[in-house]
Amino acid sequence: MSVTQQQLLDALAKVMSPRGVALTEADVLSAITVNDGKVFFSINVDAAEARAWESVRAQAEAAVRAVPGVTVAMIALTAERKPGSAAPPQSHRHAPGVPPVSSHRPPQGQPSPPSPMSKQSEIPGVAAVIAVASGKGGVGKSTTALNLALGLRHLGLRVGLLDADIYGPSVPRLTGIREKPQLNDQRKMIPIQRFGLAIMSIGFLVEEDTAMIWRGPMVMSAITQMLRDVAWGTLDILVVDMPPGTGDAQLTLAQNVPLKGAVIISTPQDLSLIDARRGLAMFKKVNVPVLGIVENMSYFQCPQCGTRSDIFGHGGARQEAERLGVPFLGEIPLHMSIRATSDSGTPVVESEPNGPHAAIYRAIGAKVRDQLQGAIAAA
Ligand code: ADP
């Protein structure tokens, strides 16, 4: 059953806004995207009003979900901070995004704002959430996140993977997942089970070639929803494949998601090491422990003869990790079979579980697990 814009607008017209007019009259709605029963839009308000609008967002979502044919409703409340106005409230569930804590120091004599971590809450049933991040795109972050998740599963852990790279979700391609998540009785999305992992990606909800344009605060809202409105079940570790880069979106995410640690992926080239340093600094700023650096595409391994060539001047990430006092988790070669298996939807740890690459990802997984032992045991 196809859903029309008019049906959605009719449903939303019944929701009252804090401005005393119907939501559709309040001049706050973004364009509404309807795609195969999945509805996305945002409600854009001034940061000062954001709290008053949270219940409106929830009502709007309920109204949209009640429209016949709607399977998923993702409605973000986004708050713009007007120049010179006070900082918006810290983000909470479905709340507006938060500008970075970075350089906004309170004027002397004023109390410090609450710690950015104070609004975080654990995800019920999930012992540890970790981020896989990189300073820039194309370094193999998603490939590493998926194979690391599989390596952790090989170690006997219950593992989930959240593809939070909402600008370019690659997990559907890397896993070959084409189906859409179903809703359970509590109307939470049921993650797709593949290779023994519970997997969720925004790419499951939109068509691959649908350009997703996310304004800053909407990023956080969408990711929060994918973290909390998904029935993850009981997991030892949830691996979050972060969007690449170290901009505001990443910082906001790092300060809002209850992360137990972060793994930074870098290639040996200087440039990406500089970017990796930015990643380290970002997590430090929000008190997320860096579990370590992985050097991806560390050396070239010839698929025919197995000969190793250090074409990028290998070893930089290990030295950098030592210099910065963070663990070095391992080196992954640039190898044809890692690329080919990723791109065909059967990651190398799954397709060649007894091969040398799977052993490397498991060894990295073991170093990660050992650092999370406390959190996993406590849960
Ligand atoms: P990112 O998430 O950083 O943008 P991807 O994981 O999508 O990067 O990887 C980019 C490309 O590099 C993909 O084609 C992937 O198959 C390939 N790739 C990643 N890691 C390796 C590796 N160690 N050896 C060979 N190819 C790799």
Image (cartoon, rainbow, N blue to C red):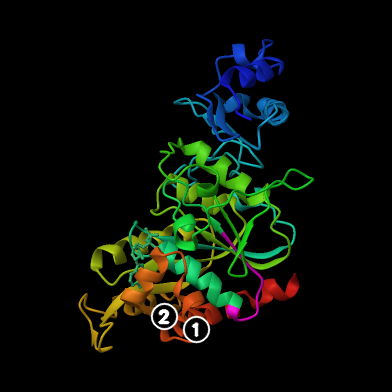
Residue 120, percent from left and from top = 65, 51
Residue 28 rendering spot, x and y as whole percentages: 56, 19
10 Å neighbourhood of mark 2: few (<14), some, or many (≥20)? many
Contact (Cβ within 8 Å) of mark 2 with mark 1: yes
- The residues colored magenta run 154-161
Q: Distance of mark 2 from mark 1, alpha carbons?
A: 8 Å
- Report whether 168 appears left or right of 48: left
**In magenta segment, residue 114:** no
Identify which amino acid the numbered label 2 is placed on.
Gly
Near mark 1 (Cα within 10 A), the count class, few <14, some 14-19 or many ≥20, is some
How many numbered discs sit on the rendered protein? 2
Of 326 and 313, the residue lying toward us:
313
Q: Of 161 and 210, which appears nearest the observer? A: 210
- 153 left or right, relative to 232: left
Q: Is residue 300 left or right of residue 341?
A: left
Quick check: which quadrant has ligand 1? bottom left
Label 2's element? strand
* Residue 90 visible in image: yes
Q: Which residue is mark 2?
A: 330
Sequence-first disc among 2 and 1: 2
**Residue 86 appearing in the image:** no
156 part of magenta stretch: yes
Q: Position of residue 15 (x, y in %)?
A: 71, 18
Residue under label 1: 363
Q: Label 1 sits on what residue type?
A: Ala
Does residue 15 appear to the left or right of 316 in the view shown?
A: right
